[in-house]
Amino acid sequence: MTQPKFDSDLYEQVMQLLIQEGSEGAAEVLRVLLNEAMKIERSQALSAQPYERSPDRKGHANGFKPKTVESRLGSLRLDIPQVRGDVEYYPSALEKGVRSERALVVSIAEMYVQGISTRKVTQVLEKLCGTQITSTQVSRAAKALDDELEAWRNRPLGKTPYLMLDARYEKVRVDGAVRSCAVLVATGVREDGTRSVLGVSVSMSEAEIHWREFLGSLKERGLHGVTFITSDDHEGLQKAIQSAFQGAAWQRCQTHLQRNAFAYIPKTDMKSQVASDIRDIFNAPDQEEAERRL
């Protein structure tokens, strides 16, 4: 592929913009340079310059697609190079901007989810980014986050031999009041060792009925083949496990067991040594060695 040559016309165009507009023309300069950079990157992706005959060519240019992107200098109307053929291409500079835009949308949604009003969200973003965001855009970003979360919560599951169940309490707004609710979490480990969070559910407590509904929802999504479960020794959870996964082996969570053991230690300065001894027992290669260390 022939290397791109220095474009004196482009240089002249940029210089004239700066001379005529000064710093006010920075946005237009950036637009011109980005458009040129994207064309160069397209040629590199195709392994050939426009109209160049090359045995290394991977595809062909296919015009441009207009797109407006936001930058620190304002809105930029760009011409995005298109390609055809067996080649994947998207401008890396624009991809970075897309990631920044996604991060901004996530930040908007996160602030809204945390209980910050749409009015305050718009004020914060205007001060931080110099960007005006309407309350409608904030609500739309929150809805987009809700849609992604809903898709994740309902994604199909499969065979997962190892299941870890736990709950933590978080402050949740319910019917206009903030309450402490149980967040039920299921983490699975597949046969290849891959670990992932299978599901999360917010409930009023860790009562059996809530655990039963949560585990039932996991099975409805296709969870099967569970042979080993680790969890706390909570009565409601135990009953739900016995009902949902009959025949699966169960082990008490080592972390919870260790925390419970601390309640029997009279002196605080002994906890680190006891914790080390407990881990040593847990890490034993077999039952005989564990009993010896005990």
Image (cartoon, rainbow, N blue to C red):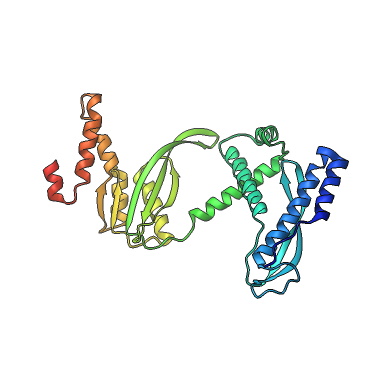
Q: Residue at x 14, y 42 (%)?
A: 293
Q: Residue 160 occupies which quadrant of the picture?
A: bottom left
- Residue at 41% x, 62% y: name it: 222
Tell me: residue 261, above or below residue 153: above
- 280 or 172: which is nearer to us? 280
- 232, above or below 1, in the image: above
Q: Residue 67, can we see it?
A: no
Residue 107: x, y in percent?
60, 41
* Left or right: 17 in relation to 275: right
Asked whether residue 198 appears in the rendered view, the answer is yes
Please give left or right for residue 30 compared with residue 94 in the image.
right
Q: In the rendered image, which quarter is residue 276 located in?
A: top left
- Residue occupying the point 67% across, 57% down: 91
Whole-percent x, y for residue 32 in the image: 78, 51
| Furthest-right residue in this view | 20
Rendering coords of residue 185 (x, y %): 40, 47
* Left or right of residue 54: residue 8: right
Q: Quadrant of the C terminus?
A: top left
User: Residue at the spot x=70%, y=35% of the render?
Assistant: 126
- How many labels were placed on the picture? 0
Q: Nearer the viewer, residue 135 or 62?
A: 62
Quadrant of image for the N terminus: bottom right
Q: Percent from the top left, x then y, of residue 144?
A: 61, 50
Choose top left, top right, bottom left or bottom right for residue 74. Answer: top right
